[in-house]
Amino acid sequence: MDKFRMIFQFLQSNQESFMNGICGIMALASAQMYSAFDFNCPCLPRYNLAYGLGILLVPPFILFLLGFVLNNNVSMLAEEWRRPRGQRGKDPAVLRYMFCSMAQRAMIAPVVWVSVTLLDGKCITCAFCTSVPVETLGNTSHPGLSQGDMKRVLARIPCKEIYDGQELIANEVAVRYLRCISQALGWCFVLLMTTLAFLVRSLRPCFTQAAFLKSRYWSHYIDIERKLFDETCAEHARSFAKVCIQQFFKGMSTDLAAARCHPPRKAPADAGEAAEKLLGITDQGTMNTALKSWHRCKPPLHLHPPALHSSNGWAGEQQPPAHPPVPRREMAAYYSRV
């Protein structure tokens, strides 16, 4: 258990690096999922477009939501957004910074999925096979077909084993044409996402450095405050349970001693230390009130320094004399007698 606790504490202290690693693993997993996915185009005019675009867009949306679910800061963002204002105001810039940071990490896996899908070309081939320019790539001397028959024949282009329109347009020509367009879109998408990431990560702090530093500082503060509050509550709960159990066994020991005429055992030495950690909150109702007060009215972000004592010589004040001064008349009478 100690090893697992140490690992958990290490992950908490390096949460940003841990989340970056999780996003990288999700990106690799998305690429591996696509390579293991058995793509089967229905080869029907009514369903090709929906199936191809569904495979292209639905899994990235699921991966995007999964990236938010695996991020521990989502609950913190929702709590900060929904909490009452109370004595502490809410800065929309900090909330936007937190949301954008989580969105950037959550976008990694969907971007990888869309890039791999476009570069592979199967989805675009299935979705837009009925839009192949037959006049340009096909056999113009072929006898004319109705619009419905033309779409039915072109919809079977992804299914090479059942394609029966070689006289109209060669299957290999149509597949190469659609795959070329898909790969061109894939590389353009990769270039666009790379450029956008560069602009967001590199140029944004240059234009709004003060606002960027302020938002980053207070987002870190909210994260650290929540962690310290959870740690303090866990320590208080541990001390509360410890004192409650000790009081229970102390009462049982007193009852047994009265019944058997044995002296009760002494309380453990750490009972007083555990009671001090309760910070005066020693019942369930008071604890519930304190938790509600923390949620409804958090303390303002204005720390009052403790008052300085005048006897320590700080703030330029002189030290008080060790003994009270002796009046001059008494000194003169003393020396005259001597």
Image (spheres, rainbow, N blue to C red):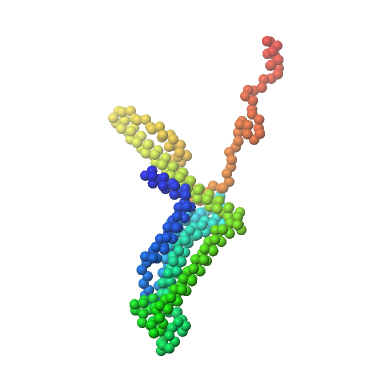
Residue at the image position 60 percent from the left and 37 percent from the top: 307
Q: Would you place residue 181 above or below residue 61 in this image? A: below
Nearer to me, 163 or 293:
163
Q: Would you place residue 327 above or below residue 112 in this image? A: above
Quarter of the image where one finds residue 206: bottom right
Please state the horizontal and vertical placement of residue 162, each as a whole percent of the image.
Answer: 34, 79
Q: Is residue 11 left or right of residue 161?
A: right
Nearer to me, 166 or 11:
166
Nearer to me, 89 or 22:
22
| Total marks placed | 0
Residue at the image position 34 percent from the left and 32 percent from the top: 254
Q: Is residue 91 left or right of residue 69?
A: right
Please state the horizontal and vertical placement of residue 108, each as a whole percent of the image.
Answer: 47, 61
Nearer to me, 117 or 317:
117
Residue at the image position 41 percent from the left and 45 percent from the top: 6
Task: Say if residue 312 shows up in the picture.
Answer: yes
